[in-house]
Image (cartoon, rainbow, N blue to C red):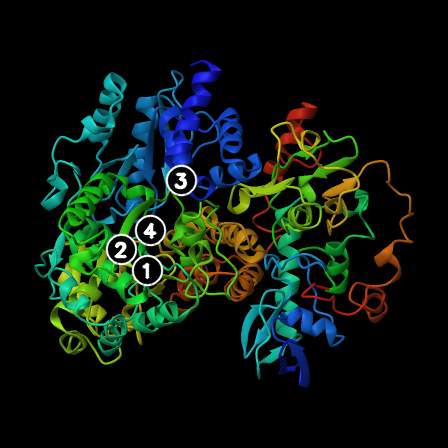
Amino acid sequence: MTKEAFQAKIQEICRRYEPGPVRLLDILREVQASFGWISDDAIDEIARTLRMPRVEVESTASFYAFLSCRPVGRVAIRLCDDIIDRMHGMERIQRVFEGELGIRLGETTPDGNITLTRTACIGMSDQAPAALVNDVVVTRLSTDLARTIVAELRSHLDPTRLVKQVGDGNNAHELVNAMVENNIRLRGPVIFAPFSPGDALPKALAMTPVEVIRHVKTARLRGRGGAGFPTGMKWEFTRNAPGERRFLICNADEGEPGTFKDRVILTECPDLLFEGMTVGGYAIGAKEGILYLRGEYAYLRRFLEAVLEERRRNGLLGKGILGYPDFDFDIRIQMGAGAYICGEETALISSCEGLRGDPKNRPPFPAQKGYLGCPTAVNNVETLCCVARIIQEGAGWFAQQGSDGSSGTKLLSVSGDCKRPGVYEVPFGTSLARVLEMVGAEGVQAVQVGGASGHLVGPADFSRHICFDDLSTGGSVMVFSAERDLLEVVEAFQEFFTDESCGYCTPCRAGNPVMLEYVRRIRSGKATRREVDTLRTLAGTVKQASRCGLGQTSPNALLDLFEKFPQVVESRLQAVTRDVLPSFDLETALAEATRVVGRPSVHSSNR
Amino acid sequence: MSRTITFILDDEVVEAQAGQTILQAAVAAGKYIPRLCAQKGLSPHGSCRVCTVLVNGRPQASCTQPVAEGIVVVTDSPELRELRKQIIELLFVEGNHFCMFCEKSGNCELQALAYRFGITAPRFPYQFPRRDVDATHPGLFLDRNRCILCARCIRASKELDGKNVFQFIGRGRDKRLGVNSRNGLGGTEAETTDRAAEVCPVGALLRKREGYRIPVGRRKYDLVPIGSEVEAGGIGAAGEGGQHE
């Protein structure tokens, strides 16, 4: 490609996304898709076209895991690397991929065609081990399937042709065409009951926006993302904040390890969600909505775009919705690009603005100053679905579901050591023991409730209840049987937070790698009691001093392990018997010098 | 005329202006709160977390948290000192800091804080990251081994110099200071006279050919410890118009 053609192509991509810099993430995704990577020349050209400093472009490009500033293969195989996939044999699968491709993890084949890498949980823990091949999801990987995938890719380099058999429901839709299965194990009355487009919206538009908010308050709806903030109150703040434009953003950046319920909602209930978003837009006075879809779910994008288009055709989106001349509302899809931190609402807003996914300083809160500085409500996928159902069935009906402080139902994403992994819609107040019984989990040692940022609980806590006032969860339930090493679980979580920290604040950026190193020392039996005490204090500091929820929750599982499973750590502790730390290995420390000098050190035992 | 707010600062009732941060109000009240990323004349960043205080019992960065009527702020306690000490130790182990041959020694805020908190050696394992040095600029020297990612140079370049020389690249532990050129700092519009060249709290961004003009032993923190009354008096009370001390 000539320099002129290259520049013309980049300029054309930039022009497609008005107004320029705030759509930088989309532009970078397209450049990556067109050229395979984002070169220095591409960064220069984007910066020139958008009239912004090149370092700002590089800053965004270098933040996201799915964007690459160095050459990579035309096909990227991203192995899902989390504790559940590891439990299902991902290590073995990885070795097969490495063997068949003749490269190590992180490398590209010599012909420049295929890159093998790892990525954080892709939302397929119910059908692990899984991987992404570009945007195509491959699930239930076996060593045989891994070999077949490599052989096929070598012959045609077309990931879409890897899908031989499609999953159930809309996974079989021609615009989805995925081997993903829904695994809906229990249908409740709120999310998985039948819903047709227009079942809720006319009822909402017959009310005033303030009445809609009052309805949501009466239903006592609380955010389903984990924090449980009352939705009606959030909307009231947003509605009452001064500003010309307002925005409603749906957080579909479902990145918490072990969570996949939003994947199923997006596949099977998109109208329920979009209707909830439209009701929300009406309630807060927004004309614009954004669905922030995690990069891992790119395979759902064309389908979701088609659903939005259908709703526009039916007058459920766009100008003068359902004949109400004063109500305009439309939704655009913002694709993410591989960053767990973007599930944090202010980081998500940064990402929508084309910036690095750094959380913002609060105050001001998004309700006052959010997207582009305008009042913005950010809601979870499941929360917005609840809104549509509340309007359809009534606030009283909804408030009667569930338990006292937690009305409605909760979707649980269950994975790990159980017979029936999948999505369960349970009423709030259901005990963890009941959940474990439903999913067919026996001989359970521990359960991680709420994903990596949640809590590790043992049998003493199984009688506790899933609700905001007891065991609060965004929905991830990972089950670990008696054979599992809980330190391996905690190590996987610390690796996750080390990889996914945005790096803005010191405690999270520098603290998580150090915590990880200590956990590894304990696991390999090389930690002293004093080091464990140091780790415990550090975990407290990271929890207290970090700037956002990621850092503040990153030591949770580790601290739970100390508190509830002390024997797991105790059994590996060594007394300091020598005058050096057990983790200090003299031979390793001397290796480089030995190599340089060409003879063993006088201090070496191999002398 | 801005509204006056009354709150409790370490058991004393103090007044502040609405819109001030806790750090600004504390400085105005003559109180020192240890800090690294906050700098007079630059917008608050809230990244180093050294200035963490308790607000109604909850930890908050005082450089970004606004004052509010009736809040109870604790700026110093054994727990807060331990928390700050650990953050300083983390900064030492995540980079490659060698005070004994760093030109900034004695003028370095990180080193001075380490002395303040009695750190002889960090208790955490050194991470020994691979970081690069940028000597492409004729008058400036950038050593990322010593960078603590406080963003002072980024903000100074934007807010005081009206330039865009610096921005962060990468994320997590791979986060590093980037410059606005593919050819290093020498390819940017950075100048030796930029305010950005003066604000680095450590020895990451230095002017060339100025080394050891003031001998070790007669430098700022060789004479007075950081945060001492003499030093605080020397740099004055709270800045005006929402400026940070």
Residue at 74% of width from left, 69% of height from top?
A: B238
Judged left or right of residue B92, residue A8 is: left
Give residue A59's position: percent from left, percent from top: 53, 40
What whole-number distance in Å separates the C-alpha atoms at marks 3 and 4?
A: 23 Å
Residues indicated by labels 2 and 3 sit on the same polypeptide chain: yes
What whole-number distance in Å separates the C-alpha atoms at marks 2 and 4?
A: 22 Å
What whole-number distance in Å separates the C-alpha atoms at marks 3 and 1?
A: 20 Å
The amino acid at mark 1 is Ala
Give residue A99's position: percent from left, percent from top: 33, 24
Q: Secondary structure at mark 3?
A: loop
Q: Secondary structure at mark 4?
A: loop
User: Residue A286 bears which disc, if any?
Assistant: 1
State the residue position of label 2: A329
Which sits in the foreground, A600 or A515? A515
Measured along the vertical axis of the image, is residue A378 above or below residue A305?
A: below
Judged left or right of residue A256, residue A64 is: right
Which sits in the foreground, A312 or A248? A312
Q: In the rendered structure, are the residues bearing label 2 and label 1 in contact, judged by CB atoms less than 8 Å apart? A: yes
- State which tag comes first along the sequence, 2 or 1: 1
- State which tag comes first along the sequence, 2 or 3: 3
Residues indicated by labels 3 and 1 sit on the same polypeptide chain: yes
State the residue position of label 3: A18
Q: Where on the picture, by quarter, is residue A411?
A: bottom left
Asked if residue A183 can be seen in this view, the reply is: yes
Location of the N terminus of chain A (image quadrant) = top left
The amino acid at mark 4 is Asp
State the residue position of label 4: A253
Judged left or right of residue A315, residue A87 is: right
Measured along the vertical axis of the image, is residue A288 above or below residue A115?
A: below
Subunit under mark 3: A
- State which tag comes first along the sequence, 1 or 4: 4
Subunit under mark 1: A
